[in-house]
Image: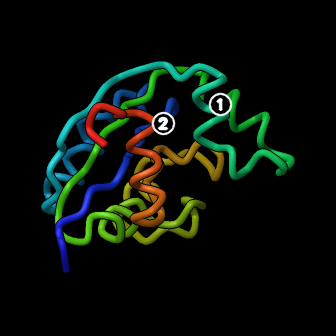
Amino acid sequence: MSMQRTLSIIKPDATARNLVGKILAHYEEAGLTIVTAKMMTLTPEQSGEFYIIHKERPFYGELIDYMCSGRVLVSILEGEDAVNLNRKLMGATDPKKADAGTIRNLYAESIAANAVHGSDSLENAATEIKLFFPELS
């Protein structure tokens, strides 16, 4: 395994319920380091660029609205096999199908309001990090 960086977003539903600290603790307890983080409210343009792969899907507009509906915490996580480790920590997109003890199992409200985002590949991690932290890429 190698040291990797991945992007994490704690989404509006989780920040609104003051779950940031609890979610960050999952990352740290699993051995991931929080390299940098910033709290922000995404603009429709930022959200649209981030979710461009979903542009043709029927839920795209709702996704953009949701991601702009409140504050998010965008961070870079670093560690051994960080992409896969973070995906495991998050659990399945549907919190009803997420393994017990995963972030989505514990904190997600629904498939749409699923508390967190994590890069799904090293390539996407690099693209996503560049979008939010261009000074570090």
**Quick check: 40 above or below 33?**
above
Q: How many marks?
A: 2
Which label sits on residue 125? none
Question: Which is more toward the observer, 20 or 101?
Answer: 20
Q: Which residue is mark 2?
A: 11
Question: Which is more toward the observer, 106 or 71?
Answer: 71
User: Which quarter of the figure is the C terminus placed in?
Assistant: top left
Q: In which quarter of the view is residue 64 placed?
A: top right
| Residue type pointed to by label 2 | Lys
Tell me where residue 135 appears, x and y as whole percent: 29, 31
The residue sitting at 53% across, 23% down in the picture is 42
Mark before the other along the chain sequence, 1 or 2: 2
The residue sitting at 61% across, 32% down in the picture is 47
* In this rendering, position of residue 62 left or right of residue 80: right
Callout 1 touching callout 2 (CB < 8 Å): yes
Identify the element where label 1 is drawn.
Answer: helix
Tell me where residue 19 appears, x and y as whole percent: 34, 35
Q: Which residue is mark 1?
A: 66
The residue sitting at 77% across, 41% down in the picture is 60
What's the coloring here? rainbow
Q: In which quarter of the view is residue 29 placed?
A: bottom left
* In this rendering, position of residue 85 left or right of residue 51: left
- Tell me how far mark 1 sits from mark 2, CA to CA: 9 Å
Tell me where residue 38 appears, x and y as whole percent: 31, 26
Mark 2 residue crowding within 10 angstroms, few (<14) / some (14–19) / many (20+): many
The residue sitting at 46% across, 49% down in the picture is 127
* In this rendering, position of residue 114 left or right of residue 33: right
Q: In which quarter of the view is residue 105 placed?
A: bottom left
